[in-house]
Image (spheres, rainbow, N blue to C red):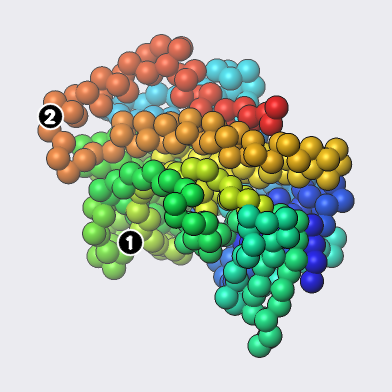
Amino acid sequence: MKTQVAIIGAGPSGLLLGQLLHHQGIDNVIVERRSGEYVLSRIRAGVLEQGMVDLLREAGVAQRMDAEGLPHDGFELAFDNRRVRVALDELTGGSKVMVYGQTEVTRDLMAAREAVGATTIYEAGNVQPHALDSDCPYITFEKDGETVRLDCDYIAGCDGYHGVSRQSIPKERIKEFEKVYPFGWLGVLSDTPPVSDELIYARHDRGFSLCSMRSATRSRYYLQVPLDEKVENWSDERFWEELKRRLPKEVANKLVTGPSIEKSIAPLRSFVVEPMQYGRLFLVGDAAHIVPPTGAKGLNLAASDVNTLYRLMVKVYQEGRTDLIERYSQTCLKRIWKAERFSWWMTSMLHTFSDQDDFNSRLQLAELDYVTSSEAGLTTIAENYVGLPYEPLE
């Protein structure tokens, strides 16, 4: 087999990259070790930045998102018995976010790829990239008992934190930066109406909580829990009772509870690898960086990587601008570190820490009061939340 761009990973970043490249006449093949059903079963984020919304529209896969997604022009911060609304559109000149689940984004991208007849190989075993620092890289994988070789010009590693792409780079050629937080998020998905039309991020002495949604009838709620907590220790009844304790009283009184349809605990970490490329291999999304979900940046950062690599490949194939290849990592990292900073700041400001004393608790409240009491502070939050502008290649 031969293609121009080989993409490892059929998650939303790999599928989005493939769709954008296809529209520009750049041939690509996606290789995924899991089944399509497994990829769709993963419950992930659902807040899309303005930039990702625009990119999905450019890729021609926004029809259902625009029809069913929930545009949000604000969200709330709850702390110290107060509720402060961050008016995103007013503070950013009209930018918003879109609440539309990652599963639905993936479903739309899968359908679009199938409609144009582009090649996606699911359940590919032992995927391995080769000759990355040469002019002729290739991928091998096993399918139906045979070893297949896929020759290509470039490889996009969209296979996540645990994928093979980053692991294929010699360790002495990259540097990893990591911060592990001493807590996780216990998340519950339920077919209940959201308690609020907008997201509520709540800081409480018992721990952080978040009220989110996937649709007008499906809610997503989170509780901060210790890192060693077990899902089986949390019945639905216990979850709802604890969530009510952490929310402002008027919000808790409106909360509609019901059976959970999914319940899981996600650890929180910040992670970045530099550089994000090695030879003809480009790392995209979680393969190169992880953020705590507090700032809603994970999927959106992957989209900004896709935007950079897509526009780079267009320059390469349509204008012969191979000189831009070496700028991929630097361009992506400039925006990534700003998003890492915002996610770390939101996490540090809204969560309780096991070694936290009264002094640090007062500092958190002072920080929240300060940034929500001035238009400058609220603008800083809003600009970061809707997403900073994508970095130009040149």
Residue 204, position in %: x, y?
Answer: 25, 36
In the displayed structure, 283 sits above or below 43; it is: above
The residue sitting at 42% across, 31% down in the picture is 341
Q: Amino acid at mark 1?
A: Asp
Residue 271, position in %: x, y?
Answer: 41, 46
Which one is nearer the viewer's eye here, 385 or 213?
Answer: 385
Which one is nearer the viewer's eye here, 183 or 126?
Answer: 126
Q: Quadrant of the N terminus?
A: bottom right
In the displayed structure, 121 sits above or below 381; it is: below
Q: Amino acid at mark 2?
A: Asp
Quadrant location of residue 178?
top left
Q: Which mark is residue 358?
A: 2
Q: Secondary structure at mark 1?
A: helix
Q: Which mark is residue 236?
A: 1
Q: Secondary structure at mark 2?
A: helix
The residue sitting at 36% across, 26% down in the picture is 83
Evaluate whether residue 107 shows in this view.
no
Which one is nearer the viewer's eye here, 361 or 218?
Answer: 361
Q: Quadrant of the C terminus?
A: top right
Residue 391, position in %: x, y?
Answer: 63, 29
Evaluate whether residue 267 shows in this view.
yes
Specify whether 229 is left or right of 83. Answer: left
* Distance from Cα at disc 1 to Cα at disc 2: 31 Å
The residue sitting at 25% across, 26% down in the picture is 364
Which one is nearer the viewer's eye here, 298 or 243?
Answer: 298
Specify whether 96 is left or right of 207. Answer: right
